[in-house]
Image: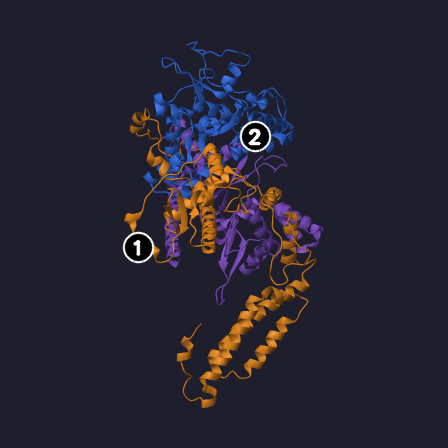
Amino acid sequence: MSQRKKASASQSKSQQTNVNEDEMTLSQMTSSQVQRARENFSSVQIDRKVAEVVQFILVKDQKKIPVRRADIVKHVMKEYKVIYSEVMNRVRRTFEQVFGLKLEEIDTKNHIYILINKLEAGETVSMCPGNPKSGLLFVILSIIFMKGGVAKENLVWNTLKKLRVDSGEKHDEFSDVKKLVTDEFVRQKYLEYVKIPHTEPVEFEFRWGLRADIELSKLKLLEFVAELHDQDPQSWTQQFREASASESRT
Amino acid sequence: MSRPMGDSHRRFLQSMMSNGIIGASQAKALHKHCCETHGAHYAHDRLDEFIDVINTQLQPMFMNIRKGMSEEDGLQYYALVNMAETDVTRMASDYADNELELFRKTMDLIVDSESGSASSTDILNCADSLQTKKLKKKETEHVLNKFVQDKWLNEKHGEYTLSVRCIIEMEQYMRVIYQDLIKVCHVCHNIALQCQICENPRCGIKMHLPCVARYFKGRSEPHCPACNDFWPHEIPEILRSQSQGSQSLSSSAKENTAPTPSTSTTRRSKRS
Amino acid sequence: MGDEDEIGGGPSGVSDEEDDPARRREIRSKYRDLINSVQQNREDMLNPANNKLIDVLEEANRLFASVKQAREAALDAQLLVLATDLGKEKASQLHAEGSAFDPSAFAEHLLSFMGLNRLEEEDDDQDGHLNGFLPQDAWQKLAKRSEVCFKTAPSFHYMLGSFLAEPPPPRQRVERQRKAPSKEAKRIMPTQLKKMEESQQEATEKEVERILACLQKYFADDPEEPISYYEFVIDPSSFSRTVENIFHTSFLIRDGLAKISLDKEGLPCIGPVEEGEIETGGAADRNQCVISISQASWKELIEAFDIKEALIPAPKTLSQES
């Protein structure tokens, strides 16, 4: 276990340096250099590259894993990385104009992107049944939000237990729940799962991940939670204030 | 150059993404819903033009919304398909390498069969000889379920067949890879897997069951449309839903998108 | 934490009484119990309706009176950190504006929304035991309703292009002519079938045992009188029961639990194999024979043997099947 963690830590470190290298090459180029570089590619070639990056991001989104700029450069952009920002601008435009999606940079330091929906969620749009996993995610995110932004691991597990989801048992729909919540949801950046300092034995707590901040509407979430309680959303004064503030930010 | 997309088109496309495939009647209802939601002009008979607008924009990404007929119920379906085979498309993460190899082998078995289907027994047996990584029987069963759930395969009584979604997306691939193993339907000229075959050895044309039903409808003495020999198979009934017009979104949503075969009686009689 | 601190003695210069290892161990153990109970019952402690937190602190005060050395003091400090943390959270609950969020109530509301079937009137949760079950689509239903909170992008899934194109192995086309399924193909059955067969097998085993018991009973009634095989297996009221009896009895023969012999008239008789008898026969003495019976021969046999009733009563569980 610890070995695996170590491995992934060193992996992300190497990715980090990779990103920084790109940063260098990208920021050191003057506009005239970019201009010259651009002339090396025909517009057909650039169109093709844009389409490939769009495909790449769609593929990465199949499992909702955020995309790193380093990976885009390494797997698709390659020698086109000198005109990275131009290609990415057109990728962004394609997502908005064709798919109604928005490419968001959730981490501007490490350049990590996710796709979110620009269209308002309709009442009857989706003909497919809900994905049970997002029901589980909703519950966890609600607890965290209603608890003021952070929830102790035990509180989350105990609440889920009441919903017949036991972190120690294999669940029919979620199979390994502990792995789903502390690994998959974390990698998708819906959740943060962090060690609480100075705890012995070690305790963990959950917070909203970077994706959740952008992909969820706190106000809609609070409204649903209130509806479940048959209460006015405003009766949770602090949560309501926070939800309204985040709504006006977007 | 091309008509621009509006939010109604985008919503339609998004719905195609999350469903993968929808029936023609659902597509009609969805068309209406998308136009009404975004206050766009709605013409009930302009669905294909509406889709063309989307397809023009999808072209550069090698994506397409394509229409096709189900071999089982004879109904029209719309599927969102990928048309490219590149290093990028091979990064798809829905299935592991050995799961994809199993899918390929299942296709081999189905294309190579007389009935257009492969038994679970045969598929389970070929899971032993996977080159990527062996699958246990239990895992194979699980993967097959996943393929059915994701609408790539259909299953009935332990027999697996290729779904409409699979045939719509893989048609070109199958023609190239399987070449002369692939026969087309004499009536609709699409790939014919589950079908009836003319028993005249010099003829041997194939016809989809729904095509047979439509072609011989009302004829007492069925003869092969190519060689005029007697057509020795049982003629299936035209399904009631086949002749039905559009349905509302809610009622069609219930039946979902996976067509259920209802021609098993004919197939059974053919085998015996 | 563990036994290792048992090894370390106190620093020199402390009196015997203060250094008494047994006493120190006892104090540490009590501290650990206390810490444990705080961690386990966190939610309970936070409940504004009780004073459990104060009880814990008072207990800690009593313990601290006998703490003389650093190791015990460290445990006291650890407990205090926990208690302070809880106290802070408890206080913030009281001072928060508006209603406080109660996760247990939230869970209850969610269960109602998901359509929990409550089996009994009584309140669950009392002893941590959960009553009732959720319908199969419970999580889907919740997911569907919570969809509006998410601005999730739909994802694109495809099959073409996800693997390298590869033509099928050529041998397949040759084999195509000979279409009969090979033995190889028949050998491995789908798991689902296997499962069904397993349960069938269990049923068979039970039935075989029941028939053996029957045979042993008739034999015990009169060990001298041979039991006619046909009289034993034939059920004059049911042909299918007769076939089943023959089938199940064959297992008794195969497993060496019963034997068939011919009487003076050359008619088959059946009897149980007694203990110790099995060895003497050995494999060489075994014979195989196939018994066939048709509806017509069944009727003939009933008449010839004048069979009025079945010696093997129809099993209770199977009766609904016929």
The local secondary structure at tag 2 comes to helix
Is A129 on the left-hand or right-hand side of A227?
A: left
Left or right: B179 as drawn, with respect to B80? left
**Residue at disc 1, secondary structure:** helix
Q: Nearer the viewer, mark 2 or mark 1?
A: 1
Marks 2 and 1 share the same chain: no
Marks 1 and 2: in contact by CB < 8 Å? no
Indicate whether A19 appears above or below B27: below
Q: Colour of chain A?
A: purple
The x and y percentages for residue C59 are 59, 78
Residue on which the image places disc 1: C280
Chain C palette colour: orange
Residue at image point 49% right, 64% down: A197
From the viewer's side, name the closer residue of A50 and C132.
C132
| Chain holding disc 2 | B
**Image: B235 above or below B93:** above
Numbered badge on residue B12: 2
**Farthest residue, direction top:** B228
**Amino acid type, label 1:** Thr
- Residue A34 position, x and y percent, is 39, 36
Q: Which quadrant, please, contains the N terminus of chain A?
A: bottom left
